[in-house]
Image (cartoon, rainbow, N blue to C red):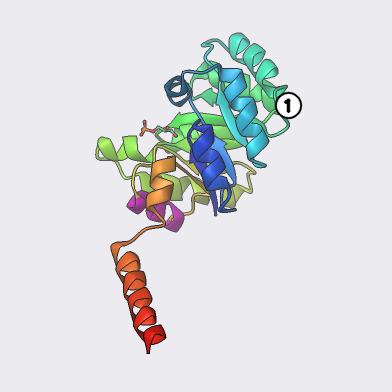
Amino acid sequence: MKFFLDTADVAAIKAVNELGIVDGVTTNPTIISREGRDFETVIKEICQIVDGPVSAEVTGTTAEEMIAQAHDIAKWADNIVVKIPMTMEGLKAVNVLSKEHIKTNVTLIFTVSQGLMAIKAGATFISPFVGRLEDIGTDAYELISDLRDIIDFYDFDTEIIAASIRNRAQVEGVAKCGAHIATIPAPLFDKMTQHPLTDNGLKQFMADWKVFQGK
Ligand code: G3P
């Protein structure tokens, strides 16, 4: 299973990247707008830090606009993935881009049908939104597990990025139901390394060691 970081915070990406367990990055217009910096500059910086796929989202609404933007974005780096919204126009764009070997991530997936259509259009990745599904009381793990079964049964190449993840239980849940990737906000990534019993245990070990050294 792979971990992506769901952020455009370059400092946070650099820090976490040193752990060696980050396989890619995802962004969206909301995440980029938080940085208050030029979209292209930020994405290019991220692509230099991380070896794996970096998703940058189009903002056009017609297939033509999305394709034109995708052509531009795809030139920014070798590890770029163009993020496309799950709409009819988005699917048209994905179909064209996949034939041109431009990698795509179809975002805002909430049903098996949406996922299947994006897979059939040639999406490299599909992004079901776990947190937002749980917000409306829908079982996100069943959706991911169904999509994974379909991908494996028909031998599709598409990978599932579990997105809209907000807590550790969701990361653990998507890992257990077959998501290929979990994209995780940077603050949650930090939290996932921690447990109060780890801190207490370490404190105790150090204290005992000090006493032993003093003898
Ligand atoms: O990966 C998509 C994610 O950034 C959206 O998260 O918490 O706004 O639903 P959230």
Residue at the location (56% across, 41% down)?
Answer: 14
| 187 relative to 106, above or below | below
Quadrant location, ligand no. 1: top left
Residue at the location (45% across, 19% down)?
Answer: 33
Q: x, y (%) of residue 162?
A: 46, 43
Q: x, y (%) of residue 83?
A: 56, 26
| 8 relative to 65, above or below | below
Residue at the location (64% across, 15% down)?
Answer: 67
Q: x, y (%) of residue 92?
A: 60, 19
Quadrant of the rendering where the N terminus is positioned:
bottom right
Q: x, y (%) of residue 32?
A: 48, 23
Question: Which one is nearer the viewer's eye here, 20 or 162?
Answer: 20
| 207 relative to 119, above or below | below
Quadrant of the rendering where the C terminus is positioned:
bottom left
Question: Which one is nearer the viewer's eye here, 195 or 62?
Answer: 195
Question: Which one is nearer the viewer's eye here, 143 or 201?
Answer: 201
Residue at the location (63% across, 40% down)?
Answer: 50
- Main SS of residues in magenta: helix
Please give left or right for residue 9 compared with residue 73 in the image: left
Q: Amino acid at mark 1?
A: Lys
Q: Residues within 10 Å of mark 1 (few under 14, many from 20)?
A: few
Q: Is residue 172 magenta?
A: yes
Question: For the residue with label 1, is its CB less than 8 Å from the closest atom of ligand 1?
Answer: no
Q: Which residue ends up furthest to the bottom in the rendered image?
A: 215
Residue 38 visible in the picture: yes
Please give left or right for residue 204 compared with residue 111 in the image: left
Residue range highlighted in magenta = 168-176
| 142 relative to 119, above or below | below
Q: How many marks?
A: 1
Mark 1 — residue?
Answer: 99
Query: The residue tagged with tag 1: helix, strand or loop?
Result: helix
Residue 150 visible in the picture: no
